[in-house]
Image (cartoon, coloured by chain):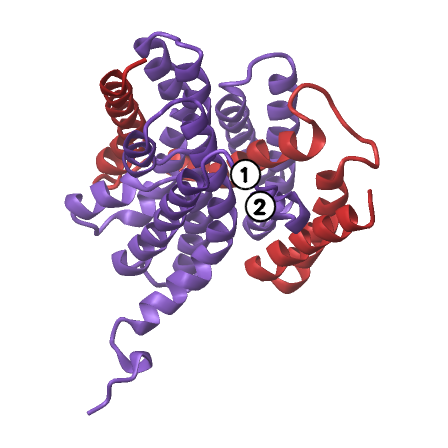
């Protein structure tokens, strides 16, 4: 009898998912940790802190909510702010939808629950690569990537709760740079020709300009919508030039 | 604020976070989209990634920072280069983190 894990039929799925999720894990553990510490310090109970990481699972919105709750802002204002901050996922969900054609609704519902900036970055790159190899993405691998990522987020939160007010500095290890490095690398993988470079450059500068002029909740969404539209216009203009 | 109210806030946050994540995949993945929409969606990932990346390397959240103290900006160029040359996500992330850690060790 062969008990080796490597020969288990699910081993290949898990191995690929683990490799894809690892950079997310690196980023989520320290940020989840910071969230756990801050939430406990703000007077949110351990159970509620954990519930937020399990049910909401959105890093920046959770950190903003901790600030609003501890400042005593009204519940509706906190919920509305969360809505605005997380509205950008609408775009990401739409962008992934063409790849998810054959999936049953129940699996789409599961997949969407764990769609974050970081998992979107990984999935959009991976789905595009699979499509170029004439393969369709299997739900098992994609859902495992998501599950590993949220587990890292929840584990980080738990460690933060346990550590309580003992704040550990993650900066000496460069962990605070993990997610930025991931965005940078995934952006490189997305770029296929010079139109993508123009789109990315425009989106990045517009997003920065909007942020610095005070449009801080909408900058990513507005910049991305305008830049993608610019990409479509450029592409059709180039086609007309060459035909 | 009592914990029960906080839990209700969390429940509300969960709903308003989930709907924008769910509705597009649920509504769009079952139908054939017009070509122009598919082209548009093809540019969304690079646009979103750049829109997330640039502000965190070019600014500290309130003003532009092109100084040598901005480690994120210094580290992003080698990170981009490693990603481009190796096509390895993990390699690029580890390189970037190591550079930031080393720069701090050196007292930058």
Quadrant for the C terminus of chain B in the image = top right
Instruction: Look at mark 1 in the image and give the residue it sits on.
Output: B49
User: Which residue does the image show at 32% across and 32% down from the upper left?
Assistant: A52
Relative height, residue A158 to residue A203 (above, below):
below
Determine the CA span between mark 2 and mark 1: 6 Å
Q: Position of residue B20 (x, y in %)?
A: 31, 28
Disc count in the image? Answer: 2
Q: Chain of mark 2?
A: A
Helix, strand or loop status at disc 2: helix
Instruction: Look at mark 2 in the image and give the residue it sits on.
Output: A187
User: Which residue does the image show at 67% across and 57% down from the upper left?
Assistant: B95
Asked if the residue under mark 1 is in contact with the one under mark 2, i.e. CB atoms within 8 Å, the reply is yes
Q: Chain of mark 1?
A: B
Toward the bottom, the furthest residue is A1
Helix, strand or loop status at disc 1: helix
Crowding at label 1, few (<14), some or many (≥20) Cα neighbours within 10 Å? Answer: many
Crowding at label 2, few (<14), some or many (≥20) Cα neighbours within 10 Å? Answer: many
Camera-nearest residue between A211 and A237: A211
Q: Which chain is purple?
A: A
Q: Quadrant of residue A202?
A: top right
Residue A60 visible, this angle = yes
Q: Position of residue A134 (x, y in %)?
A: 37, 63
Q: Which chain is red?
A: B
Camera-nearest residue between B70 and B53: B70
Q: Quadrant of residue A68?
A: top left
């Amino acid at each position: 009898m062969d008990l080796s894990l490597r020969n288990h039929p699910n081993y290949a799925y898990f191995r690929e998912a683990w490799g894809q999720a690892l950079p997310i894990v690196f980023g989520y553990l320290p940020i989840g940790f910071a969230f756990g510490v801050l939430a406990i310090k703000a007077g949110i109970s351990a159970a509620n802190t954990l519930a937020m990481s399990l049910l909401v699972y959105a890093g920046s919105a959770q950190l903003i909510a901790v600030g609003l709750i501890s400042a005593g802002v009204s519940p509706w204002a906190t919920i509305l702010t969360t809505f605005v901050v997380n509205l950008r996922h609408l775009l990401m969900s739409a962008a992934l939808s063409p790849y998810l054609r054959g999936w049953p609704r129940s699996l789409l519902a599961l997949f969407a629950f764990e769609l974050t900036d970081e998992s979107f970055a990984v999935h959009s790159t991976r789905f595009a690569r699979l499509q170029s190899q004439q393969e369709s993405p299997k739900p098992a691998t994609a859902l495992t990537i998501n599950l590993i990522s949220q587990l890292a987020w929840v584990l980080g939160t738990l460690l933060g709760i346990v550590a309580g007010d003992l704040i550990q500095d993650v900066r000496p290890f460069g962990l605070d740079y993990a997610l930025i490095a991931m965005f940078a690398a995934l952006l490189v993988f997305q770029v296929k020709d010079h139109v993508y470079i123009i789109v990315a450059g425009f989106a990045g500068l517009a997003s920065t300009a909007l942020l610095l002029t005070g449009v801080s909740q909408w900058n990513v969404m507005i910049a991305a919508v305008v830049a993608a539209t610019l990409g479509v216009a450029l592409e059709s203009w180039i086609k007309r030039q060459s035909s | 604020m009592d914990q029960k109210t906080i839990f209700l806030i969390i429940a509300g946050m969960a709903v308003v976070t989930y709907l924008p994540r769910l509705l597009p995949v649920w509504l769009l993945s079952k139908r054939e989209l017009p070509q122009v929409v598919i082209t548009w969606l093809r540019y969304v990932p690079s646009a979103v990634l750049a829109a997330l990346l640039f502000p965190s390397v070019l600014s500290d959240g309130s003003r532009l920072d092109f100084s040598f103290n901005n480690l994120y900006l210094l580290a992003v160029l080698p990170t981009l280069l490693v990603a481009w040359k190796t096509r390895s996500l993990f390699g690029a992330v580890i390189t970037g983190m190591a550079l930031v850690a080393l720069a701090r060790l050196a007292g930058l």
